[in-house]
Image (tube, helix red, strand yellow):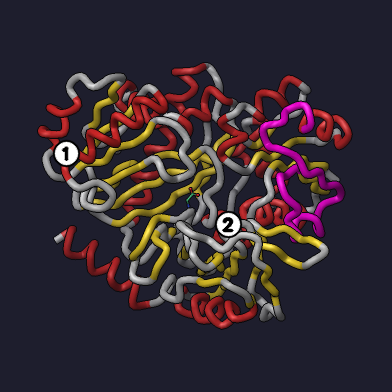
C-alpha cells in the first residue's frame, strides 16, 4: 500500500484524496482546516499553515510517504515540492522554477514567444509606465491587464467588463506595477473558454477530458467573478462547442510548453499542467496556465478516471507516463458548487449548514467548511461541490440539480450550469464565430 502525503484541504484535495484511496493508497493530509471528507478518508491529519514549512516537514517526517501530492496554487508557488525533495520526497507538483508557469503571467507569455509556441495573444510586459499608454492605443478598445503574480483569481481585468477605457486600464496597470513590479497588457480574445488539463512527467503529457468552468456568481453568467460556481464535461472527452482540432491544438501547445520549460530552466514539470484555453474564430489561444488541478475541474475528471491514479502519480514522478494508457470512463459530468449567501463579495462567514441525504450516484466534496462541535461551519468561500455523472450532460445535470436541496442553510448555487439552454448558447456563439 502506497503512503501519500496530501497537501491542501479544499474540494479539489478531497477529490484527489478520494481517488488515491480508491486505488489503494493510504492518504495523510496536511491542511489549514479540517475538511470532514478528508478527515474520514485519511490515515493521519494535521492542521497547519500552508506556509509553515517546519510544520509540514515534521508531518512529512512522521508520515514517511512514498510520494506527496500538493493540491493548491500557493504552496506550489512557494516551493513546497522543492522543500519536500530536499527531504528525499518526490511530489506530484512542480518545482518552484517551473511553477512560474502559473505564478508569473509574464514568464509564460515570454516562454511561448521565445520558443515560438502558438497560442499567445499580442502582448507586452511592462516594468514601469513607459510605453503603456501607447500600447493600449495600439490594442484599441479590447484589452486585458494582468497582474504578474498569484492574486487568488482576481488579478486579471478585462476591458468592457472590469475596466472601462484606457484611463482605468492605466490606473490598474500602475497598481500592479506598485504591487509586483511587473504587468502584462495583452489582446483580448472573443470565443469560448475551456479548461484542458494534462498529466505531465516533464516530457510526456496525457490529456484529461475537457471541462468548462463558470466563473460568474449568478445565473446567465452575470455578477462578479468567483473561484468557479460549477463545471461540466462530456462523455466523449470534448465539449459541445469544440471541434477535435481545438483539442489537438491545445494538447500540442501543452506538449511544446513542457519541452520549453525544461530547455529554459533545466527542471522538468512533474504534475498537472492546466491550460485555460479559448476557442476563437482563428483557432485555439492560450489564456493562462495553472500548475495544478482546477477547482472545480478536478471534481469532474477524477471520479471518472479509470487508470490507477497511484500508478499515474508514480509514472509522473518516474518520467514514465508514456507506459500507461491514461483512460477515463465515457461519462458526462456536471458539478454545482453550493456557496454562502453573499459570495463572493459579502459572504456570510461562520454560518452553519446541514447536509441531508445525498442521492445515490451523486459525488459530494467538502470545500471551505470546518467540522466543529457546533456542526458544519462555512468559511467565506465555496462550501460543497456536488457532481452528477451520467451518459449525457443533460442527465448528469438533472441528477445533480435534484441533489442540491440536500444542503440547507444560508447558501445559493447556479441552477443553470450544465443545462441545455446554457450549452446551446455556447454552441450558437461558436457557430456564428466560425461562420
Ligand atoms: N477553475 C479555476 C481554477 O481552478 O483556477
Q: How many marks?
A: 2
Q: Which residue is mark 2?
A: 380
Q: Is residue 39 left or right of residue 188?
A: right
Front residue of this view, candidates 308 and 425: 425
Residue 249's place in the image compared with 51, above or below, is below
Q: Is residue 373 left or right of residue 149?
A: right
Say whether residue 72 is magenta.
no
Contact, CB < 8 Å: mark 2 with mark 1? no
Q: Which residues are magenta?
A: 30-55
Residue in view at x 21 percent, y 65 percent: 431
> Counting residues from the N terminus, which is met first, the one under dot 2 or under dot 1?
1
The picture quadrant where one finds residue 254 is top left
Q: Position of residue 105 (x, y in %)?
A: 39, 32
Say whether residue 36 is magenta.
yes
Q: Position of residue 408 (x, y in %)?
A: 63, 77
> What SS does tag 2 mark?
loop
Task: Check the picture and name the quadrant holding the C terminus.
Answer: bottom left
Residue 255's place in the image compared with 20, above or below, is above
Amino acid at each position: 500500500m502506497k503512503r501519500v502525503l496530501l497537501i491542501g484541504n479544499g474540494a479539489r484535495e478531497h477529490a484527489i484524496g478520494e481517488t488515491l484511496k480508491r486505488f489503494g493508497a493510504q492518504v495523510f493530509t496536511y491542511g489549514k482546516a479540517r475538511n470532514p471528507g478528508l478527515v474520514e478518508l485519511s490515515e493521519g491529519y494535521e492542521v497547519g499553515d500552508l506556509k509553515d514549512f517546519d510544520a509540514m516537514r515534521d508531518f512529512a517526517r512522521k508520515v514517511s510517504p512514498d510520494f506527496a501530492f500538493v493540491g493548491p496554487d500557493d504552496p506550489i508557488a512557494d516551493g513546497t515540492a522543492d522543500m519536500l525533495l530536499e527531504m528525499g520526497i518526490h511530489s506530484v507538483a512542480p518545482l518552484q522554477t517551473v511553477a512560474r508557469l502559473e505564478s508569473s503571467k509574464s514568464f509564460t507569455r515570454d516562454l511561448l514567444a521565445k520558443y515560438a509556441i502558438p497560442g499567445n495573444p499580442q502582448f507586452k510586459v511592462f516594468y514601469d509606465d513607459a510605453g503603456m499608454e501607447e500600447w493600449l492605443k495600439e490594442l484599441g478598445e479590447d484589452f486585458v491587464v494582468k497582474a504578474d503574480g498569484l492574486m487568488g483569481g482576481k488579478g486579471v481585468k478585462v476591458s468592457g467588463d472590469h475596466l472601462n477605457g484606457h484611463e482605468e486600464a492605466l490606473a490598474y496597470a500602475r497598481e500592479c506595477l506598485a504591487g509586483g513590479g511587473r504587468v502584462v497588457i495583452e489582446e483580448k480574445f472573443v470565443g469560448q473558454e475551456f479548461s484542458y488539463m494534462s498529466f505531465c512527467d516533464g516530457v510526456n503529457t496525457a490529456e484529461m477530458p475537457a471541462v468548462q468552468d463558470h466563473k460568474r456568481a449568478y445565473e446567465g453568467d452575470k455578477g462578479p467573478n468567483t473561484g468557479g460556481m460549477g463545471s461540466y464535461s462530456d462523455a466523449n472527452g470534448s465539449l459541445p462547442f469544440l471541434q477535435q482540432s481545438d483539442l489537438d491544438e491545445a494538447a500540442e501547445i501543452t506538449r511544446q510548453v513542457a519541452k520549453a520549460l525544461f530547455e529554459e530552466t533545466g527542471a522538468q514539470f512533474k504534475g498537472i499542467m492546466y491550460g485555460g484555453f479559448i476557442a476563437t474564430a482563428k483557432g485555439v489561444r492560450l489564456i493562462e496556465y495553472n500548475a495544478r488541478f482546477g477547482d472545480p475541474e478536478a471534481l469532474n475528471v477524477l471520479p471518472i478516471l479509470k487508470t490507477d491514479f497511484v500508478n499515474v502519480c508514480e509514472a509522473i514522478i518516474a518520467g514514465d507516463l508514456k507506459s500507461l494508457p491514461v483512460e477515463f470512463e465515457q461519462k458526462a459530468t456536471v458539478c454545482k458548487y453550493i456557496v454562502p449567501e453573499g459570495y463572493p463579495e459579502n459572504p456570510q462567514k461562520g454560518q452553519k449548514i446541514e447536509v441531508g441525504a445525498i442521492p445515490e450516484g451523486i459525488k459530494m466534496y467538502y470545500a471551505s467548511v470546518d467540522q466543529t462541535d457546533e456542526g458544519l461551519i462555512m468559511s467565506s468561500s465555496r462550501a460543497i461541490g456536488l457532481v452528477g455523472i451520467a451518459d449525457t450532460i443533460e442527465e448528469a445535470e438533472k441528477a445533480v440539480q435534484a441533489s442540491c436541496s440536500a444542503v440547507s442553510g444560508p447558501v445559493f448555487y447556479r441552477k443553470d450550469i450544465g443545462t441545455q439552454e446554457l450549452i446551446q448558447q455556447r454552441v450558437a456563439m461558436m457557430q456564428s464565430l466560425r461562420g
